Every structure is written in structure tokens, then in C-alpha cells.
Image: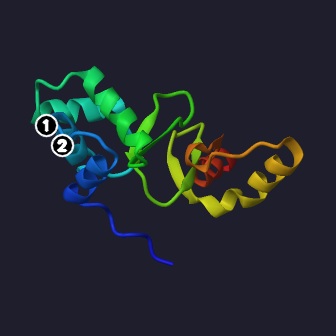
Amino acid sequence: MSSPAPLTLDELLARVRAGGRRVTVAKRTVARVLLTTTGHTRADDLINDVHVMAPDVSASTVYRILDEFEELGLVVHAHLGSGAAVYHLAGPVHGHLVCNVCHATTEVPSAVFDALAQDLRHEYGFTLDRHHVALSGVCAACARRRIS
């Protein structure tokens, strides 16, 4: 099964309008930055990139836009360990494995958490938010170095 095609700027902004929101220069700029960013990005890095394109857009405006985009289902944030939250465009739901040694993050398909999600629902009545799953441990490369 293939992933859906990535959104274009026009499609992303059309979804903003369809959500009853105005498209401003700041929103257009944040959207452009998100569309050119690969992987997970800290808000501070997004803010820096936005400032390159639009120096007058404040950090608080970028945070408000990220919140709005998340409400509209366009952006997802996750907490990967002890660092700042990271953001990425919404796409296929996935979880994260974060290495405690090298801090590498590996995206894993949501299906990896099916049994865990079912157990949590059955045992605790808890519904797992798969967009925000981050498990910490030691990656294979770091584990090999520890054995050597």
C-alpha cells in the first residue's frame, strides 16, 4: 500500500480555508517552511526558517499557526524524549523509537503498536494516540558498539 502524495502549498492552504480560517502571509510562510522541511523539526528551527523568509513573523505567531494547523489535522507534534516537541506535516500515522545513547529517532509504522494499543484498551480502557508514541531504548548500532 503506497502513501498518499504529499500536499502542495495550494492544497494545504485550501484546507486552511476549508477549515474556516483566513490565509495570511504568516500562515503561507509557515506552510512553505513545513513543506520544504524533511522529517521532524523543532519549533525553534521552524521559527528560524520562517524568519529567513518573513522576518516580521514573531515566534508566538508561528506557535499559534502550528496549533491551528494541528487543529485542522495538517500538522502533528510529538515529544521524543526529553527534548523539545517536534513537528511534521500530518501523513501516515507512525510511532518513534528514540535511542538513549546516540539520540537517533526511527519512525516505525503504527501497526507495530497494534498489540500494545489493544492491550491498553482492554486492560485499562486507554486509547493510545499513535501520533505521539515515542519509545526510548538503545538502537541496534549502539547496542553493537556496547558489545564490542
- Scheme of colours in the image: rainbow
> At x 19% / y 57%, what residue is drawn?
10
Say whether marks 2 and 1 touch (CB < 8 Å).
Answer: yes
Q: Amino acid at mark 2?
A: Arg
Residue 47's spot in the image, x, y percent? Answer: 25, 30
The residue positioned 51% from the left and 78% from the top of the image is: 1
**In terms of secondary structure, where does tag 2 sit?**
helix
> CA–CA distance between discs 2 and 1?
5 Å
Judging by the rendered image, the residue that carries numbered circle 1 is 25
Question: Which kind of residue does numbered mark 1 sit on?
Answer: Val
How dense is the environment of label 2, judged by Cα within 10 Å: few (below 14), some, or many (20 and up)?
A: some
**Which of the 4 quarters of the picture holds residue 64?**
top left
The quarter of the picture where residue 60 lies is: top left
Q: In the rendered view, does 50 fall on the left or right side of 62?
A: left
Q: Position of residue 110 (x, y in %)?
A: 61, 59
Q: Is residue 110 left or right of residue 85?
A: right
Q: Secondary structure at mark 1?
A: helix
Q: Residue furthest bottom?
A: 1
Residue that appears at 31% across and 43% down: 20
**Coordinates of residue 73 in the picture (x, y in percent):** 43, 48
Which residue carries the number 2 mark?
28
Query: Where is residue 113 drawn, in percent x and y?
Result: 69, 56
Q: Is residue 123 left or right of residue 81?
A: right
- In the depicted structure, whether residue 57 falls above or below residue 12: above
The relative height of residue 18 versus residue 22 in the rendered view (above or below) is below
Q: Look at the image and tell me whether residue 54 can be seen.
A: yes
